Structures are given as C-alpha cells and as structure tokens.
Image: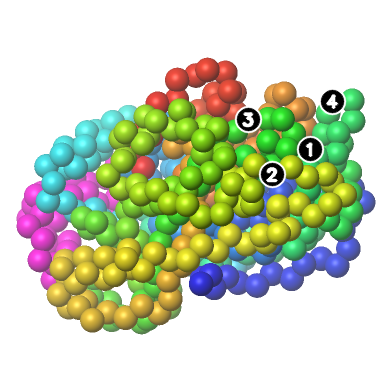
C-alpha cells in the first residue's frame, strides 16, 4: 500500500526543447529542478509515475546530520541549513520542524561508536550532545530500557515525505519548469557522442544536459547505454500509526531495534533500522563483489529473497528499443508490500520499550526499495564517458534528509557553477575506476 503523497498536476504539453531534462521526480530530482530553474535555466522534470511516488515518500522523514558517514556530513549540514528556511523558500509547507533527534542504547559497542563519531564530527563544526545513562533516561520518559547512554542532536529535525518532493516540484514550476508525470524516458538521444536530448514515451525533448535522478531505476537506465553503475535495491518496511497523544517524542527517537518519528497529523511513522531484504537479481549478481564489504558488515540485518526482477523491474536483464514499451512503463511505481513480520516486530519492540504504546494500531504500512551503493554514498556527478549526462542517485536510504542540498549540488554541477560543497566524495568515477569503495561508515 503506497503512502499518501500530495498530488501534482502535470503540464499538458511536452516541450520540444529544454536547457536541462531531469529524469525522476523524487526529492533529488525535484530539488535539482527547483535550483536549476532558480538559476534561470529552462527545465523539464519527468517521471514515469508520479512526483514523489517511490522512495522519497516511503522514508522515515528524518532530517539529520547525526551519525552521517563523515564523507557525507558537509552535505547533510548544508541541507539542514536549507531545511530550516525551506517553508519560506518554497512558499509552502514541507512539514519541517527542528525538533532534534535522540538515540539511546543498551549496547556498549554502539555507545562507543557514537562517542567516537561525535568527537570526529566536531572537526566539521557539527555539535551534538553525548548523553549519560541518566540523561538518556531523562530524555525518554516512560521507557523501560536500561540505557547506558545516547546522543542528542538538537539542530536536526523532521519533515513530511508526502509533501517535500511535490513542494519542490511546484516551486520549480513557478520559476518556469514544466512537470510531466506518467511520461517515462526510454533513453538518451545522442549526437556526435554527446547527449542531444531524451526519447520519452510521448516524444523527444532536445536538451544538451540530462540529469538522471531515477533512484532504484538509475542503473538499468545507464546499462541501456553501456554504462556501469553499481547499485543494489534493498526492500524495506515502515508503517504509520493513527493519532497518538504526544507521549514519546516530538521529533525522532531511535531505540534498539526500532525508530519512531512524530508526524504533522499527530501519528507516528515507525521503521526498523538496519533491516532489509535483497532480492536475487541480474543486477545483484553483476555487482555482487563490490557489495561484499557492506554485506560482511551488515549481514545480521539483511535477508535474501526472490521476487520477479530477472527479466522485469529495475534490476532486470532488460533490453528495449526506443520505439517500444520500456521497463519504466511496465512498472510505473515500485510499490513492494510491507513485510508483516517486520510490522509485528516493530509493534512488539515499541511496546517493550514503552508499555503505554501496547495495543498501538497500524493505520497503514508500506514497502520501499532503497537504491544503495557499495560505499553508502550517493553519486552526484557528471558522467564523463557520456558528455551531457549527470547523475544524482544511490542515496542508500538517507536521501530525504540531504535532498535539498543534494539537489543544489546537482544543480551546481550541471550548471557549471561553484559547488555548494566539495563534490569529490560523490564522483561517478569512483564506481568504475577501481577505487576501493569499502563498506559504508555510520548511516
């Protein structure tokens, strides 16, 4: 069951040309379209389904700097700056509230890792507070846990996944961009070895710059053009509760085995950190060796499954010509079912930590497919082997929080402007030049 998303109306007519075409209208693509339009470029934002219909509306809604991979921390910090003024910037409600985030634990290894991260993060001028056992208990009134400590990041916050991408897209349109939903891009139109536009199911748009922000579909799109992009899809489960009195947290709270985030409607969004299912697929086999370090580090939270991805879906062995229906049209929206066992586990853990939540109901549950890279860091970069093509993908389950600044960085790169942060960690070349990617840092 898909979570609700604010509806966006498409423009009626496909433009014959645009300065820049953005493929994918999740938060990465919609934010990039907004910043590009603000820079004065003509932009066409296209999606095979609806704005924010896939992972950008299926995440927890956390906007955090805390526990980021240090390579990603500067981008996360810029994003929190943007989030703080985003309702004013876009002229619409995104749901952002700077409520702070709290993590508590009864595991000494986790606590030691958090202390180490906090010290290293201070080098970036990111300041969070390591909690003693007493402070952790004080910040989680009503909990039964014997916490040995925790961490509190007061400058972090929460926002609404159902609102953020649509608000970016609508703001981009007010600056002159056009929005085209249910309009799959089948491939790139090339001329003299350079991007000359895109071929869509509704016709061709001429453009010398194309930004692919296709999430879990990005690797398949590049594979059609002979380009490698190691990505793995990880199926996740989350659920929402009805309205609950404000008895646990006004922001986000990470407990052992479960996370909880207050929503604008007064309910909670609940997730299970570090848990996911990887389906056996052609793409998975193709890039398996590059993901081995990550698998070794996180094998306890990963299960393996078999769905239908070998000849269909984003990780398939698919081939198509531009004059026939593509895989993107055959599956408009990735809408995997929630794992009922994980939903039950989430409810059980919440009741264990907070007896007052025993009997909590589930208003709705959903699955998602997280586009993951071997090192857990996104690709925000030009694709040098194909001049005119750019990528913003591989956000590994934490793209929502960094989405506003990631969109700005992508726009800077496409426009050739000074980047908002150093783009080196996000370069595409690292995926194909033999760089030892290793496993992700903290996430």
Q: Nearer the viewer, residue 298 or 255?
A: 298
Q: Whole-percent x and y of residue 134?
A: 7, 55
Say if residue 238 shows up in the picture. Answer: no
Label 2 sits on residue: 318
Q: Secondary structure at mark 4?
A: loop
Q: Quadrant of residue 54?
A: bottom right
Instruction: Report the magenta residues as a range.
Output: 127-155
User: Which residue appears farthest toward the right when viewing the image?
Assistant: 16
Badge 2: residue crowd in 10 Å (few <14, some 14–19, many ≥20): some
Q: Secondary structure at mark 3?
A: loop
Question: Which numbered dot is residue 193?
Answer: 4
Seen in the picture, residue 156 relative to 162 is either above or below; the reply is above
Say if residue 331 shows up in the picture. Answer: yes
Q: Nearer the viewer, residue 301 or 213?
A: 301
Answer yes or no: do the residues labelled 1 and 3 have beta carbons within 8 Å?
A: no
Answer yes or no: do the residues labelled 3 and 4 have beta carbons within 8 Å?
A: no
Seen in the picture, residue 60 relative to 298 is either above or below; the reply is below
The number of callouts visible is 4
Question: Which numbered dot is residue 228?
Answer: 3
Gap in angstroms between the C-alphas marked 1 and 2: 25 Å
Answer yes or no: do the residues labelled 4 and 1 have beta carbons within 8 Å?
A: no
Q: Whole-percent x and y of residue 175?
A: 76, 57
Q: Nearer the viewer, residue 212 or 84?
A: 212
The structure residue drawn at horizontal position 34% and vertical position 47%, both measured from the top left corner, is: 302
User: Which residue appears farthest toward the top when viewing the image?
Assistant: 434
> Quick one: label 2 or label 4, which is nearer the N terminus?
4
The structure residue drawn at horizontal position 20% and vertical position 78%, both measured from the top left corner, is: 358
Question: Which numbered dot is residue 209?
Answer: 1
Seen in the picture, residue 431 relative to 184 is either above or below; the reply is above
């Amino acid at each position: 069951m898909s979570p609700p998303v604010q509806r966006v109306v498409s423009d009626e007519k496909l433009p014959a040309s645009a300065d820049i075409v953005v493929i994918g209208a999740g938060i990465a693509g919609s934010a990039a379209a907004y910043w590009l339009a603000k820079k004065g470029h003509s932009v066409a934002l296209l999606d095979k389904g609806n704005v924010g219909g896939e992972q950008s509306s299926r995440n927890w809604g956390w906007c955090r700097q805390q526990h980021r991979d240090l390579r990603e921390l500067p981008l996360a910090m810029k994003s929190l700056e943007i989030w703080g003024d985003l309702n004013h910037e876009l002229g619409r409600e995104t749901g952002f509230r700077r409520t702070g985030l709290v993590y508590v634990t009864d595991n000494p290894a986790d606590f030691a890792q958090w202390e180490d991260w906090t010290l290293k993060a201070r080098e970036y001028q990111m300041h969070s507070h390591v909690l003693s056992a007493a402070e952790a208990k004080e910040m989680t009134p009503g909990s039964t846990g014997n916490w040995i400590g925790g961490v509190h990041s007061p400058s972090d916050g929460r926002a609404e996944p159902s609102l953020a991408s649509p608000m970016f897209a609508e703001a981009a349109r007010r600056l002159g961009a056009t929005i085209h939903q249910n309009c799959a891009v089948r491939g790139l139109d090339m001329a003299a070895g350079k991007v000359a536009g895109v071929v869509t199911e509704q016709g061709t748009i001429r453009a010398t710059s194309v930004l692919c922000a296709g999430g879990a579909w990005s690797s398949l799109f590049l594979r059609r053009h002979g380009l490698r992009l190691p990505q793995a899809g990880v199926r996740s489960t989350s659920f929402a509760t009805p309205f609950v009195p404000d008895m646990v947290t006004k922001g986000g709270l990470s407990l052992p085995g479960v996370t909880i985030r207050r929503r604008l409607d007064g309910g909670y969004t609940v997730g299970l950190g570090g848990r996911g299912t990887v389906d056996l697929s052609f793409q998975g086999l193709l890039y398996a060796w590059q993901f081995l370090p990550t698998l070794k580090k996180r094998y306890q939270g990963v299960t393996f499954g078999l769905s239908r991805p070998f000849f269909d879906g984003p990780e398939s062995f698919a081939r198509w010509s531009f004059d026939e229906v593509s895989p993107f049209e055959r599956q408009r929206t990735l809408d995997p079912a929630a794992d009922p066992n994980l939903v039950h586990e989430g409810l059980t853990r919440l009741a264990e930590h907070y007896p007052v939540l025993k009997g909590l109901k589930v208003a709705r549950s959903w699955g998602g497919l997280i586009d993951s890279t071997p090192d857990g860091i996104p690709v925000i970069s030009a694709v040098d082997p194909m001049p005119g093509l750019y990528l913003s993908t591989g956000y590994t389950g934490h793209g929502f929080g960094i989405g506003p600044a990631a969109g700005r960085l992508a726009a800077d790169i496409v426009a050739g402007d000074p980047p908002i942060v150093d783009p080196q960690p996000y370069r595409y070349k690292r995926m194909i030049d033999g760089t030892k990617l290793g496993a992700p840092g903290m996430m």
